[in-house]
Every structure is written in C-alpha cells, then in structure tokens.
Image (tube, grey):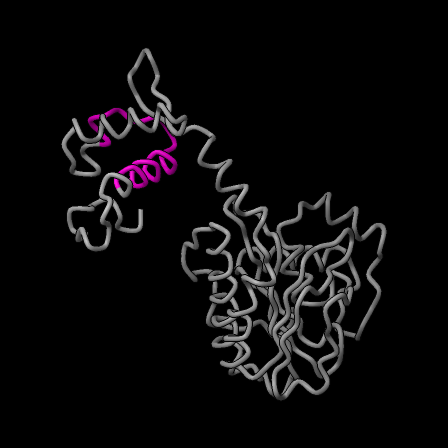
Amino acid sequence: MNGVHDPEQTSRQDHPVRSVHRALVLLEILAESPRSLPLSELGRQTGWPKSSVFNILTTLAMDGYVAQDPETGRYRVTIKPFLVGGAVVERMDIRGLARPLMAELMEKTGETVNLGIMDGTEAIYLETIAGPGAIRVGTWPGKRLPIHRTALGKALAANLTGEELAAIIGKTGLPPGTPNTHSTFESLLADLELARLRGYAIDDEEDEIGMRCIGAPIRDHRGRTIAAISLAGLAHRMPSEDMPELIGLVVRAAGQISELFGHKEKGLGSVRSKTPSAA
C-alpha cells in the first residue's frame, strides 16, 4: 500500500484534516483486499483505535463508499469510488497528460517520441515530438500505420488475444515495409508474446530501412492498454549497445504516464539487459 497505512508517522502539517486522510487510507485498504475485512483487521493494519476506524467506516457506509455485511460484520468497498475514479479517467486528455513526459524523454534521448492508440485495425499517431536529429523520421499526428511492423503498433497489439489478432490480420494482411517485416502470422504472434512478457516492443528496421524504434504500452487503472509511446530514430543513432538504456527510459516514461491514469506499476523487472537482434 505504498507505505500509507501508518499515518501516525505523517505530520499533521502534511495532512491537516486527519479524518479525511484516514478515510482515504481505509478505502485504499478495502479496495486492494481480495475479500471483505473485519473491523479488527482494519485496526491492525492501520494501528488506529477501533473506535476511530468504526466511526470512519460508518460515515463511509452512510455515503455509499463501503458496505458492511449484516451477517459477518465485515466491510468491503462498493463500486462508488470506482465510478468516481472512472469518470475522472474518461475525461482525461491523454495527449495533454502524456506530452510533458514525452518531451522529457525526447530531451534525454534526442530522438522522436510518438504517442498512439489503436483505431480499428490500425494504429494512429496522436502526438509526435521530434528530436533534433530526427530529420528522416516521417511521423505526424493523424498518420496511420499497420500494427505488425512498428514498435508502437506492436506495443498496442501485444495484449490482444490470438483471435483478436487473427481477425485484424485477416482483414489487413501483413503488407511488407522492408525485408525485415513479419511475413507470417506465427512469427508476429511470437513477437507480440515476447513484447507482452518484456513490457516493450522493438522495430528493428521493419517499417523502414535505417530506422529503429522502441515502444511501450500505456495502461489505465484496470490494467488495460489504452495507448502506447515509442522512441524512433536512425539505427546508427540507436546502436545495440545503447538499446538497454533507451528501453529503460521508454518503459519508465510509459509507466509514469500510466500512473496518471491510475495504473500501479510493479516495477521494471520486465526490462531485460540483453536487446534482441530483431523484433
């Protein structure tokens, strides 16, 4: 719970309305618990007097944020907090939220950073921030691209089911961009599975000779892939020895954007130190 369950260590200056802070902590505990919890367990986890916990839970129940089982007396969170959070997420401007972190990634790498979403059978760029060395990177907002030969497209497609992917490829085929483009459904499926496991996708001159790209998914509070970012540049500016560091930067930026949508990142353990020679 990110260390928030010991509010006695937090000064009143940080949380001037302590009862509000405690109510939010209790909601977080209940939201993350796979089962309802008794008053005693909530008191144990927080270290607060049972009377205080009971009073806060009673207020939350009156306002519809928690419910108490009349038979067991255990408490659970209701759907109301998620409806409130979901309404906020739906109104979020992904371009506006992502752009500062995209700009930071561009500044760190000097390469072009793209933001895109799935649109039917294709990926579409929503935003592009060109790096100073990106003379040949032909991306712009509104550009559409097939999902099978770019890192951004593959990052978006990595969590599709085999049936969903087959339906898309059945309509679009696998039009080649270069000799490195996936030419069979099986090879694409294996690449997407690897991207899903690692948390990032690679385009190694698959869309255009001389271009290399790294893509990572952006997820929402439910863990759904809602968008992706990519870092694109000339292959000689993104050599194999630099790829692990660049991958880490891209995955980290995608994770930070995901956090703005309520996704809780579990770390960068999926980023491997060895970069594949081809995607």
> What segment carries the magenta color?
22-42
Residue 16 placement (x, y as % from top left): 22, 49
Tell me where residue 30 sits by quadrant.
top left
Q: Number of labelled discs?
A: 0
The residue shown at (52%, 60%) is: 198
Magenta segment, prevailing SS (helix, strand or loop): helix
Whole-percent x and y of residue 169? 80, 53
Most foreground residue, 192 or 257: 257
Looking at this view, is 239 or 75 the one in front?
75
Q: Which residue is drawn at 73% across and 85% down?
A: 136
Judge from the rendering whether residue 46 lies leftward or rightward of residue 183; answer left or right. Answer: left
**Residue 151, percent across and down?**
65, 67
As rendered, which of 158 and 12 lies closer to the eye?
A: 12
Residue 25 magenta-drawn? yes
- The structure residue drawn at horizontal position 46% and vertical position 56%, both measured from the top left corner, is 259
Q: With 156 as the anchor, is 7 left or right in this view?
A: left
Q: In this view, does 18 lie above or below 250?
A: above
- Asked if residue 107 is positioned above or below residue 3 in the image, the reply reads below
Q: Is residue 232 left or right of residue 170?
A: left
Outermost residue, top side: 71
* Residue at the far front in the pictured view: 16
| The C terminus lies in quadrant | bottom right
